[in-house]
C-alpha cells in the first residue's frame, strides 16, 4: 500500500508530512499548496500524530485532494516559530511543483496562533490564510491589511477564548482588511472539524492569488 503522505525529515527546520496530488494528467502544472499547522496535542517526534486532526487526516481519506499539503510537526514543549517555518517553505518551493502565488496557510489552536504570527511576519508569502481558534497581538494585524483572512472560532471555546479571534478580526476591520469571520454558536474548542470538512473553505482559498507587491 502506497502511503498517502510522505514523511520528510529535516535537520534545519521542522519535519513534515507531504501530500502530493497525482499529476499524471498535468505534469508541468504548478499546484496550489496548503500549509497546515497542528495544535499543541500533536507536538512530538512521530509524524503519524499530525494525522489526528485537520487536513492531514482529510487527505488520508481523499487521495484526490487538489492541493499539495505540507504539515510540519512542532517538537514537544515548543511553539510554532517563524524562522524554521520560513526555511521549510523556501525548501519546499525549491523541491516541489508549488505555485508560489497560490500558497495558503491554516492551522488550529496552537496552529491558529502560529498562522496569525507567521502571516503577520511574512504576509507577502501567502495568497490567503484561515486561522482556527487562534489569536495573536492585534497590533500586528495591520500587516495583514492586503491579505484575505477567514477566521473561525467556537463561541463556547473553553481553551482559547473567542475574544482572541475577535480582537484580531476587529483590528483587521479597523484598518480596512479583507476579513471574514465565522463563529460557530454551539462549538467548544473543536471548531476545526466542521471548518476543514467544508468544501467552501477550499473554494475560497482558490479564489485568491498572492498580491503582486510593487517594489
Image: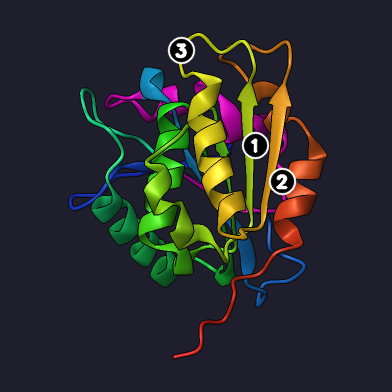
Question: Which residue in the structure is indicated by mark 3?
Answer: 159
Disc 1 secondary structure class? helix
Q: Nearer the viewer, residue 165 or 17?
A: 165
Q: Is residue 88 left or right of residue 169?
A: left
Give SS at disc 2: loop
Q: Which mark is residue 65?
A: 2
Please give the name of the residue rendered at 46% of the width and 12% of the height, measured from the top-left corner.
159
- Say whether marks 2 and 1 touch (CB < 8 Å): yes
Front-most of residues 139 and 35: 139
Front-lying residue, 23 or 92 = 92
* Disc sitting over residue 59 in the figure: 1
Q: Residues within 10 Å of mark 1 (few under 14, many from 20)?
A: many
Mark earlier in primary sequence (3, 2): 2
Q: Is residue 173 left or right of residue 42?
A: right
Tag 3 and tag 2, C-beta contact below 8 Å: no
| Magenta-tinted stretch | 43-71
Residue 115 in picture, x, y percent from top left: 45, 44
Q: Earlier in the sequence, mark 3 or mark 1?
A: 1
Amino acid at each position: 500500500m502506497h502511503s498517502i503522505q510522505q514523511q520528510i525529515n529535516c535537520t534545519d527546520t521542522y519535519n513534515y508530512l507531504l501530500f502530493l496530488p497525482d499529476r499524471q494528467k498535468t505534469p508541468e502544472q504548478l499546484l496550489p499548496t496548503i500549509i497546515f499547522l497542528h495544535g499543541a496535542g500533536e507536538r512530538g517526534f512521530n509524524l503519524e500524530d499530525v494525522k489526528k486532526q485537520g487536513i492531514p487526516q482529510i487527505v488520508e481519506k481523499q487521495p484526490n485532494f487538489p492541493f499539495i499539503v505540507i504539515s510540519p510537526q512542532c517538537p514537544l514543549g515548543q511553539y510554532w516559530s517563524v524562522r524554521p517555518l520560513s526555511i521549510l517553505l523556501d525548501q519546499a518551493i525549491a523541491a516541489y511543483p508549488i505555485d508560489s502565488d497560490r500558497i495558503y496557510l491554516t492551522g488550529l489552536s496552537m496552529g491558529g496562533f502560529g498562522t496569525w504570527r507567521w502571516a503577520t511576519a511574512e504576509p507577502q508569502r501567502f495568497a490567503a490564510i484561515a486561522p482556527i481558534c487562534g489569536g495573536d497581538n492585534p497590533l500586528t494585524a495591520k500587516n495583514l491589511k492586503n491579505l484575505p483572512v477567514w477566521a473561525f472560532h467556537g463561541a463556547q471555546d473553553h481553551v482559547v477564548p473567542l475574544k482572541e479571534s475577535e480582537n484580531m478580526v476587529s483590528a483587521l476591520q479597523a484598518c480596512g482588511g479583507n476579513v471574514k469571520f465565522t463563529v460557530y454558536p454551539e462549538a467548544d474548542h473543536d471548531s476545526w472539524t466542521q471548518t476543514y470538512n467544508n468544501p467552501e473553505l477550499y473554494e475560497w482559498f482558490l479564489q485568491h492569488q498572492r498580491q503582486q507587491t510593487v517594489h
